[in-house]
Amino acid sequence: MVGINPPVFDFAWFDLWSKPLGLLNILEYLRVHNDVYLIDSLYEARTKALSFGRWKVKKEKVRKPEAYRNIPRHYYRFGLSPNELENRLQVLPKPDYILVTSAMTYWYEGVFETIESARKVFPEATIILGGAYAILCPGHAAKSGADFIQSEPLDISSPHPAIDLYEKPEYGVIMSSYGCPMSCRYCASGKIFPYFRERPIRDVIEDIRFQISVSDARNIAFYDDALLINKRDRFYPLCEAITKEFPHLTLHTPNGLHVSQIDEECAEMLFRAHFHTIRLSLEGIDSYTRAASGDKTGKSGYELTVKALKSAGYSDERLETYILVGLPGQNTDDILRSVDYVKSLGGKPKITEFSPIPGAGMFELASKSCPELENEPLLHNNTIYAPWVSGSIPPDMMQRLKDLAR
């Protein structure tokens, strides 16, 4: 059995502690009764080491698809080429099943290319396509050439991901909970994880223990969508256990933390447990963006959070704060005010471009003005949606926002 993480086709891609955690958990679950192998087309194309265990990945300029014909930017494949992937497959034992994962809906070109290569090398193998794209766009995924589309979330139990299938993993990836109890209108987390579920603390600790035992990894990235929910009963004890068991680790939260949950005690806990990379989910201070974000926080809540984090020891440049731009109906002046507000408090604004995701509450609103979103996932790409698809934020204004946030 072979699991494959496809290459990415996009205008840009960065390793934000990117590993196919779902696929790795499935491979661990299946290896009890099967021989399993992994090809990670991104990891195996790494070229230059970056900070905290991350990597630059080989990229190759490719022809833009028709949907992107008028976008004045270069377009790339990040990861293994078809020939390189086929060479990797040819040295493996003949598999009965090939599991191909998927992430962003607009990265499906890499999925299609991977399935084509896998079919070429192993024509008799059954190819199963899963992951976020398969769940969110099952009708489109049916065009991939896979024999079966796993269009429903899998509820399996695995003690840890099969991270040891990597040659030398420089960081670990973990989820201490699945799903999110919030209902942000721009998010489709509820389609991927239909209900919020917390893992026992002892299971999380053993998961971390395994992952760092198979390499010299000193960095762990938490993939939780709601890491701080139920913080006193779950997150605080988890931090205390990590500090005691693994004081050498550096922790990262590439997904945004709920600002309303960070008070002085929480900030101190984050700092003591060595959470180095933290991203704050403010999204915006205007009423429209706050409502789309489930009213997670307001201006006063953010001010208290920034004060608490600084008091705990975090410097200004580490207070990265997500500002969401490009929502249908959003006012550009409100975005500018949000950026200025974050900077006035010493925070570091981080522009996050809206992606219309099938299954999210705002997808229907976005597709009313752009019906093509229903049939072409390439148009979901957050890089091009607001400036080039919806036209809600012209390219020069988008660049101005990014420049102001620096």
Image: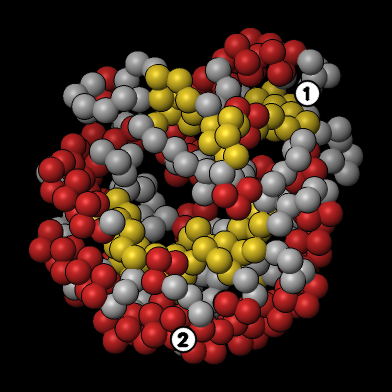
Q: Is residue 321 above or below residue 303?
A: above
Check the picture and name the quadrant holding the N terminus: top right
In the displayed structure, does residue 194 sit left or right of residue 274?
A: left
Residue 311 is tagged as 2
Is residue 69 shown to the viewer in this render? yes
Q: Is 98 in front, or is 54? A: 54
Residue 117, image quadrant = top right
Residue 150 is tagged as none
Which amino acid, mark 1? Answer: Asp
Residue at image mark 1: 96
Residue 159, image quadrant = bottom right
Q: Earlier in the sequence, mark 1 or mark 2?
A: 1
Q: CA distance from mark 1 to mark 2?
A: 56 Å
The image position of residue 388, as x and y in percent, is 18, 37
In the displayed structure, does residue 183 sit left or right of residue 176?
A: left
Q: Is 29 in front, or is 268? A: 268
